[in-house]
Image (cartoon, rainbow, N blue to C red):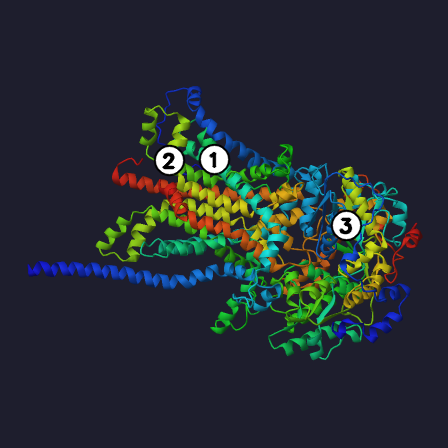
Amino acid sequence: MAVKAKRLSNEEHQRRLAIRATRLREIVTTIILTPLALIWVYPFLWMVSAAMKTNNEIFRAGTNLLPNEPTFENFQRAWVQANMSQYFLNTVAIAAGSVFIVVATTSMMGYVLGRYRFPGRRIVIGIFVATVFLPKGYTIIPIFELIGNLGLDGTLFGVILAQSGGAHVIFILLFAGYFGQMPKELEEAAIVDGAGFLRVFFQILLPLAKPVMATVVIMQLIASWNDFLLPLVLTLPRPELRTLSVGMFAFRGEYFTDWSGMAAAATIAIVPIIIVFLAMQRYFIEGIAGAVKS
Amino acid sequence: MSAKRKMTRRDFLKTASMGSLGALLAAQGLPLAAQDALINIVGSGANITSDPVTFRWVDSGDQKAVFWNAFFAEYMEAHPNVTIQYDALPWNEIAQVVPLGIRNGTAHDVYQRPLSVTLAQAVNEGWVAALDDIIPDFEAWKASFPGGVFVEGITGFNGKTYSFPATANKRYGTHLLYNVAYLEEAGVDPQAGPMSADDFVATAKKVTENGAGRYFGFIMGGNQVNRWGAIVREFSRMAGAISMGVGNFDVDLSTGEIPYTNPLYLEAIDVLLRLRDDGSVFPGTLSMNAPEARARMPQGAAGMILQGPWNIPIWLRENPDFDFNIAGQPLLDPPTLVPITVGPGGSNEIHVNAAASDEAKAIAGDIFHYLGTHAGQVAWATLVGAADPAIFAEAIAAADMQPLERNALLMFNEQVRVGPSQIVRNAETAAVNLELRPVTPNLAETVQGIYTGQIDDAAAALADLAGRADAELDRAIAAAAEKGAEVSRDDYVFPNWDPYQDYGEEFYAELM
Amino acid sequence: MTTIQIPLPKPIQHTRSLRQRIADNRWVYLFMLPSLVLTLMFTLYPIFASFYYSLFQWSGFTSAPHYIGTLNFSEVIVDNQFYNAFKNSFIFMFCSVPIKLSLALVIAIVLNDRALRLAPIFRTMFFVPVVTTTAIVGIVMTFIMSPFNGPINMIMLDLGVLARPIDFFGDPKLALYSVVGVEIWKWLGIPMIYWLAALQTIPASLYEAAEVDGANWRHKFTYITVPLLKPFAVIIVLITAVGTLNVFALAMTLTGGGPYFASEVMEVYIYRTAFGAANSLTLPRIGYACAAAVYFGLSVMVMATLQLFGARWANKERAGLAAAETTAGGA
C-alpha cells in the first residue's frame, strides 16, 4: 500500500511537472511574442495616433505614438469633408452585395467541382487555374465598357457586379476541398428522404460549410472595402454613390496632403473590418483547415 | 504679422524701378471687409434653369479648391435648385477618369483637360463644347482678357474657343524657399540679390554645420523623380540653355536641337552632386516624395528647398509661426539671368463637356463669365494667391493678398516670359504629339541615377539621352507625316526667339 | 495543372453515353453557370481584350485605335527596362516567398500551441497589417525606416550595429529589398492563417503520443509536422507566390520603382508605360503596356506550370515508392 501510494504521488508529481512545464512554456512564449506582435502592429497604432494629432505634430513627433494634445477634430473633419457618413452606407451596401454574390457563386461552383464527376470538369478546372497566371487585364477599360454596355453605369449594382466578377480561384478551391471531404452519407440519407439537388445543397451541405464561408466573407470584404479605381470611375455620374476609399482621396492633393485627416479617415474605414475579423477569426481558420484537410 | 511679411524697402525700390505692370502688381490691395462680401453672385445673363439640376466639376484642386468651395457654396445659395458636385483629384487620376468618363458619356460637365491630351485631339474627338455659344456676351468677355491668354491653336481652332485657361502660368517651380532663422544664422541674406549656385552650395554646407545633425542645408522630394529633372532643367535654362518641353523631353526651339549636351546641364547636375558630397542634403531625401519634403520645411528640418509658389499659402495657413521667405532660383552663371519660358495661354485649362446638358452648359457659361469679371478675378486672386495666379494684373493689385505671395508674383513677372510654340505656328504639329513616345530614361530619371551613383558617366548619359530624344522627335514627325500631317523638323526652329521677351504674334508673323 | 487535388467521391460511370451523362448532370452545369458567366465577363474578357489591344497603337482616349500588328511586341523585347522589371519581379518573388512562408510557419506553430491562451489576440495582431490601407502603410513606413530619426536606424545606431544611418528606400542597392521587407510585414498574416489551418488538421494526439515516447520539439517538428504539412505546402507556396506578384500599390507608395528603376517591378513598369509618369506630356500607350503584360503573364504561366509538373513528378515518384513498399494501391 505504501508502494502504491508512492507510485501515485509520483504520477501526480509527473502530472504536475507537466502542467508546470506547459505554464512555463506559455509564459515564455507570451513574453517573446508580445514585443514582436507589438512591433507588428506599431504602424497601425501609428496611424491611429496620427489621426489624433495635428499635421504639424505628425512630423514633429516622428515615431512617438502619444499625441501631445489628443484631438478628435480630425475624425470630425474626416466624417464631414470626406463625406464619410454618406459613403459609409454605400461601402457597406457594395461590400455586402459583392460578398453575397461571391459566396453564392463560388460555393456553388466549389460544390459541384468538389462532389461531382461530370464531362467537362477538367476543362472548367483548367480554365480557373489558368486565370491565376494569365496576365490580368492591366487596363480597367474593358470592365468599364462592359458595365456601361449593361447599362449599369452609376448604379451600386454595377460596382457590386464588377467587384464580384473575377475568377476567385482560391475561394472555389476552398469550397471544393471542404465539400469534397464531407462524408457521402450526408446527402445519401437526404436523397433517400426524397430531397432534390437544390435541397441537398442549400439545406444540408451549405450550412455545414460555415467556416469556409467565413473565410470568403473576410477576404472578399477586405478586397471590396479597399477597392478604389473601380468605384471611382463607375460612380462618376452619381457621386452620392461613392465609397469610403474614394472619399479618402479628398485629403490627397497634388500639392498638399492632409496626413492627419487621411489617417482619421483610414482609421474609421479599417475599424469595421478588424471587428469582423475578431468576430469571425475562429471560423476563418477552421474554414481553411477543413478545406485543405482532404 | 511679422515685419518680414511686409514689403522691405529694398523690395519697394526694386518695384519702383519696374515697368507699369510691375507697379500695378506691387500696389497694396485694399483689405476686403469679409470673405462673404468677396464673392457676389450676380447673373451674367445666362439662362439658368429653375428646375432641380446637378452640376459636376472636376479639377486638380489644391489651392483652387479653396476658391471653388467658397464660390460653389455661394452659388448654390443663390440658385437653390442647383446642386454642385466639385471633385478635386490629383493629375494622374484626372488623366484616367476624364477620358473614361467621356468615352462612356458620364464625364463631369466641366473638367480640366489631362496634360497629355492636346486641345486639337479633344476637339477632333468632339469632347469639348465651343465656349462661343455658351458664355453670355462672349466677344466682350473674351476681349476683357489681356493678350496672349486666348491663342489660336492653344485655346481654340478655326475661330472657335474651346479652352479657358483659368489661371496665368507665369510661375516656375524651382525657386528658393528658405528658413529665415537658419539662413540668418549662416550669415546669408538671399534678399540681398540673386544667389549664385556656388553660394547656394556653400550656404547649404554652413546651415548643415550649424544644424549639427538636427537640421540640414537642403531638402527635396527625391522620390518624386520629376523633381530632379525640374531643378536641373530650370538651372540650365536660367543660365542660357533655353528650351521648351516637347513630349517628355526638351527642345531648344531657337535651333531645334536637344539641349542636354550643353555643358550647363552638367554644371547644374554638379550642383546637386556637391550638395550630396558635402552632406548638406537632408537624409532620406531619395525616399521622400515632394509633399513630404515640403511638409518637413516648416518643421525646421532644412534651411532651403527649391519649390514653387503653391507652398506659400499652405505654410502660411498650416504653420503660422514658421518664419520663411522666398527668393529667385540660384544662378549657375551669375549675373546671367535668362527668364524661364512658359507656353502661351495659361494653366488649369478648363472645358465644358460637349455632351453636357443645356442646363449644365448654361451654368458653366454663367460661372466662366464670372471668372472673366473684375470681381471674379479679385476673388480668385484673394483666395488662391500665388499658387495659381489670377489672370488680370489689376485684380492681383486689388486683391487682399499676403505680401509674400505678392512678392512671388512680382518675382515671376520679372523672371518668366512666354516662349514660342510649334502648335501655334503650325496646328498640324499636334499630330506629332499623338505619336511621341516617352524616352526612357528621361532627364529626370537620368539625373536621379547620376545622383545615386547608378550612372557613372554623366556626360555620356546626357549625350545618350540627347541622341534618343532627337531620334524620337524625328520618328514621331515621320510617323505623323506618314499619316498625312504637314509637319517637319523646321516647325521646331524659331531663330527669332528672344527669351527676354514674350514670344507674341509679331514674332510668329516674322517667320512667315 | 490538374495536380490541384479535388477528391472524386462519385464512381466514374463510363458505361453511359456522354449525352446521358450531361443530361444527368444538368443541375451541376446550372450550378456552375453564375460563376462561369462572371469569370467570362470580368476575367477572361479583359484578358482577351488585353491581347487584342496589344496589337494596336492606342492611347485609350481616341475612338480609333491604330492597328500595328506585332510592333509593340518587338519593341518590348528590346527594352532594357522591361528586363530590369522582369528581373526585379522574380528577385522579389524569390526573396519574399521563402522568408514570408517560413516566418509565417514559425509563428503559426507557436500560435497553434493550445497552452497559449492569448493566441487569438496575437493572431489578430499579426493579421492587422493585412487590412491596413496601403496608402497609409507607405507613409508610416517612410517614417519608421527614415534615416533621419527613424526608429529602426536609431536602434541600430545605438546598438553600434551601424556607423551611419541606412536610407532603406533611397539606396539603390537596398530599395528593392526594403520593399520586400515591408511586403512581408504587410502580408504575413495570410500565409500564417493558411499554415494555422493546415496545422489544425494534425491531430493533437499524435504529438501527445510522441511526447510519451520522449520526443523533443525537434523530433516532433521533423517527424510529425513537416511530413503532414507537405501536401498543403504546394498549394500554399503557389497561392503566396502568385499573390507576391501583385505588389503594385505597395511598390508605388514606397518607392515608385526608384531610385532610377532600382525597385521597378513588372506591375510598376506596366503602369508607367500605360499611363506615363505624372505630368508627362506624352500619351498613354495602352497597347504597349498590354504587350508587356502578355509577355510577363505567359512567362509566369510557363514557370508555374513547370513548378506544378515538377511537384507532380516528385509526388508520383514518392507515391511509386510507397506503393512498392506496401504493395497497396492508394486511394
Q: Disc 2 and disc 1: Cα gap in Å?
A: 17 Å
Mark 1 burial class by Cα count in 10 Å: few <14, some 14-19, many 20+: some
Q: Nearer the viewer, residue C305 or A276?
A: A276
Q: Which mark is residue A104?
A: 1
Q: Is residue A117 above or below residue C261?
A: above
Q: In the figure, residue B319 lies in which quadrant?
A: bottom right
Which marked residue is nearer to the observer: mark 2 or mark 1?
1
Same chain for labels 2 and 3? Say yes or no.
no
- Judge whether residue B456 can be spotted in this image: no
Q: In which quadrant is the N terminus of chain B drawn?
A: bottom right
The three-letter code of the residue at mark 1 reads Ala
- Chain that bears disc 2: A
Q: What's the CA distance linking mark 2 and mark 3?
A: 62 Å
Q: Earlier in the sequence, mark 2 or mark 1?
A: 1
Residue B473 image label = 3
| Same chain, labels 2 and 1 | yes
Residue at image mark 2: A180
Q: Tell me the mark number nearer the camera, choosing from 3 and 1.
A: 1
**Label 2 is placed on what type of residue?**
Gly
Whether residue B408 can be seen here: yes
Residue A283 vs residue A132: left or right? left
- The chain letter for the residue carrying disc 3 is B
In which quarter of the view is residue B10 placed?
bottom right
Q: In percent of the image, x 24 and y 59: which residue is there? A: A18
Residue B452, numbered circle: none
Residue C247 picture location, percent across and down? 54, 51
- x, y percent for residue C270: 62, 47
Of C184 and B365, which appears nearest the observer?
A: B365
Q: Looking at the picture, which amino acid does disc 3 mark?
A: Leu
Q: CA distance from mark 3 to mark 1?
A: 55 Å
- C311, B99: nearer the viewer: B99
